[in-house]
Amino acid sequence: MKAPVPAPASAHRTVGADARLHWWALALPALAFGLLLLLLAGSGEVQAATGETAPLLKVSEELLRAAG
């Protein structure tokens, strides 16, 4: 019978309150949120220039009609 192979030192990670996040674990969601916010803010300018309703507003109006 073989003896169990010990796990490498890199496999032991801190879990719980002492765990630390990588920089990208906070940066990527923040970047995605900022880009989506810019897209939403920029869609109002497109609506004013063309006179059309923004696609996001169309979808939300349809969802509200279907729900209520």
Image (cartoon, helix red, strand yellow):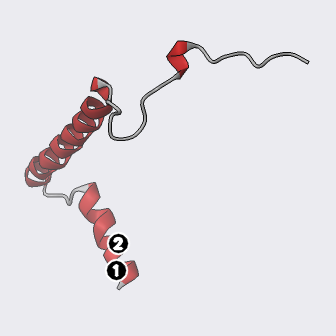
Label pair 2/1, CB-CB below 8 angstroms: yes
Report the label total. Answer: 2
- Disc 1 crowd rating (10 Å Cα; few below 14, some 14-19, many 20+) is few
- What kind of residue is marked 2? Glu
Q: Name the element at disc 1.
A: helix
- What kind of residue is marked 1? Arg
Residue 61: give x, y in percent of width and height: 28, 71
Residue shown at the point (63%, 18%) measured from the top left = 7
In front: 68, or 44? 68
Residue shown at the point (33%, 64%) measured from the top left = 59
Farthest residue in the right direction?
A: 1
Q: Is residue 59 left or right of residue 54?
A: right
User: What residue would you read off at disc 2?
Assistant: 62
- Where 43 sits versus 51, above or below? above
In front: 56, or 17? 17
- Where 42 sits versus 48, above or below? above
Image quarter (top left, top right, bottom left or bottom right) of the N terminus:
top right
Residue 19: give x, y in percent of width and height: 35, 33
Residue 21: give x, y in percent of width and height: 32, 30
- Where 65 sits versus 22, above or below? below
Residue 2: give x, y in percent of width and height: 86, 16
Q: CA distance from mark 2 to mark 1?
A: 5 Å
Quarter residue 48 falls in: bottom left
**Which label sits on residue 65?**
1
Quarter residue 53 falls in: bottom left
Image quarter (top left, top right, bottom left or bottom right) of the C terminus:
bottom left
- Disc 2 crowd rating (10 Å Cα; few below 14, some 14-19, many 20+) is few
Residue shown at the point (23%, 37%) measured from the top left = 30
Q: Name the element at disc 2.
A: helix
**Which label sits on residue 3?**
none
Farthest residue in the bottom direction?
A: 68
- Where 32 sits versus 4, above or below? below
